[in-house]
Amino acid sequence: MSRRLHPVAAARLLVIALIAMLASAAGGAFAARAVGAQASSAAAQVLGELPQGLGLALANLSTSRLKIAKKRAERRLIDFVELMWPVLDPGQPFVRTWVQEAICAHLEAISAGRLTKLLINVPPGFTKSRLVNVMWPAWEWGPKDRPDLRYMAWSYDARLSEDQNNDCRKVIESEVYQLFWGSRFSLLGDSNAKSYYKNDKGGWRRSSSIGGAGTGYRADRLLTDDPHNVRDADSMAALKEATTWFAKSLPTRVRNASGDVRVRVPFWVRAVHGKGLEDDPDDNRPVTVSATIVIMQRVHLHDISGVIMKNPALGYEVLLIEMRYRGENHPARKSEHWKGSSIGYADPRIVPGQLADPIRFPEHVVAAMEAQMMLDGGSDAVAAQFDQWPLEVSGSWFKVEWLPVIEPHEVPTDVSIGKRGFDFASSAAKKSDQTADARVGRGASDRKFYLWDTHAIRGGPGDVEGFIRQRHTDDPQAVEWSIPEDPGTGKLYADYVIRELSAGRYVSSSREEKDKVTRAKPVSAQAQHGNFVIVNHPGWELARAELVDFPYGDHDDLVDAISRAFAAEVAMPATPTEVGGWTVDRAAA
């Protein structure tokens, strides 16, 4: 006589056995959770002992749960993320908040064709990169059945975009993903690398860095993820490189610029290819419009986000989530360029200062992070990374009220004849840099610095040479020069200037070791404290305008020349006395 199982135990055993059989039928999916042959063989005994209909209900139970999970993941991206999260981070559960739901809702709008350009500004640590650059492509390929889509991703460091590419592949190759959507496409082994892989339905993923590979490839989804390195926030060269790439290179990488096009596929093409093409020959096939997504934390007022927000004609939807809620008082929302959500999104917070994610980032944690950032980056680091709005620094290095202008006869008599600094360029192009010079002296009594004169010229090598010769003719010999050794042939050119264009004058040369902002900071500090004065001279308006616009104006050549002259005067102050056998004539100075 066989031993009868308790009904509850029998039900549990049957469910376990059915899951094991489902896993086996799925080609090994969930194999690690299978209970083995003993449970499977016991299923027949259990089914025979249960009341009629209950066995069928229990059999349908596990299948139903799998169907629910699959259906939910196909319907909403956020559910797909929650389902697949353990694949990438099995040790930490997915913390689902309104922030992640807001990001996913905007990505869903792109998948549905409601948005084509999206800027996401969110503080660090909110899984924005994983959502956009890892989960979303996998969701479109499988659950949304669009394995034909092509993705191109960029970051400031190619290794970051490669890691995200690799994480996306891990999701696709996981047992869960293959169980539900593995029949829809397959990755091709001949291209299954970190930076590039493709599938058998025409879709692919590529990754690169800002300014790196990408030319020649056009994609349906252009993903720019953290294009700026936070450590380069004060580097004008790095900032310029990224914004120039965004303006000139990124727009040319779209596969289809318009989604308002429908193409009639010939009946004979439909007949050959069948699946994937509409059955109705009169139904024109829509062309998928390419979408551009920029996801980043702010690093600078004039970073790529700043360019986008300042130019609403670019057509970007902006998802802005600051760490501490500022509501309509946020500078971005107060801007004349701000426009509300086109998909009905609204920040759910009401109280100013309310945290975006008090579960993972409670008050004491955020306060500690703010204190840490203040140690190095100051309030601007907090404003940029947490408030998503860097402090307004345009005009803060040099303000108009810091730069008084006086007449030559008002200059104290003990102000030195000064040193002249140069900044070289050699192009006659309309928008090219200029060759510029400036002479800065210092008062013996008031210790203030005086900008005696400035000059600038845009021209070719011959024009620049004539410009330098003219300065040599006009300057008393006591005026010492400081010239830069620019990259490349800078040392050779500096030697040429010293030997051929300024013989008989003391001229020093040196390489520009630091960036323009760093070199201008000492001058800015003196100006801020009322110790920098402009002497009225032809061109003083241009010099002051360039100082005020620095470092975001079209040109900074005069600023560079002033910085060099200032540094030379501080290092070796000139005096209105005989120098090198020449008597300095103050009137001529």
Image (spheres, helix red, strand yellow):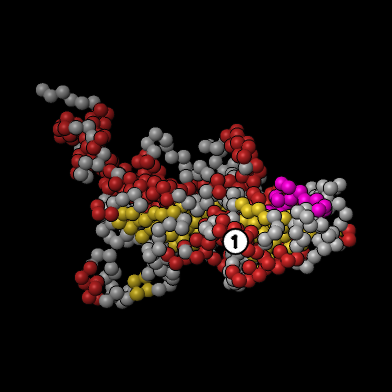
Judge from the rendering whether residue 39 lies leftward or rightward of residue 306; answer left or right.
left
The relative height of residue 253 versus residue 353 in the rendered view (above or below) is below
Judge from the rendering whether residue 472 lies leftward or rightward of residue 485; answer left or right.
right
Mark 1 element type:
helix
Q: Callout 1: 10 Å neighbours few (<14), some, many (20+)?
A: few
**The one of 475 and 306 positioned closer to us in this rendering:** 475
The relative height of residue 316 versus residue 139 in the rendered view (above or below) is below
Tell whether position 260 is magenta: no
**The one of 88 and 404 positioned closer to us in this rendering:** 404
Please give the name of the residue rendered at 22% of the width and 45% of the height, measured from the top-left corner: 26
The relative height of residue 239 versus residue 380 in the rendered view (above or below) is below
Report whether residue 440 is seen: no
Judge from the rendering whether residue 480 lies leftward or rightward of residue 16; answer left or right.
right
Q: Quadrant of residue 427?
A: bottom right
**The one of 547 and 301 positioned closer to us in this rendering:** 547
Quadrant where the C terminus is found in the figure: bottom right
Magenta span of residues: 559-578
Please give the name of the residue rendered at 30% of the width and 44% of the height, measured from the top-left corner: 174
Quadrant where the N terminus is found in the figure: top left
Report whether residue 158 is seen: yes
The percent position of residue 215, horizontal first and vertical second, equals: 40, 63
**Dominant SS in magenta:** helix
**The one of 258 and 205 positioned closer to us in this rendering:** 205
Q: Which residue is mark 1?
A: 496
Tell whether position 566 is magenta: yes
The percent position of residue 191, horizontal first and vertical second, equals: 28, 54
Q: Which amino acid type corresponds to the residue marked 1 in the rendered image?
A: Tyr
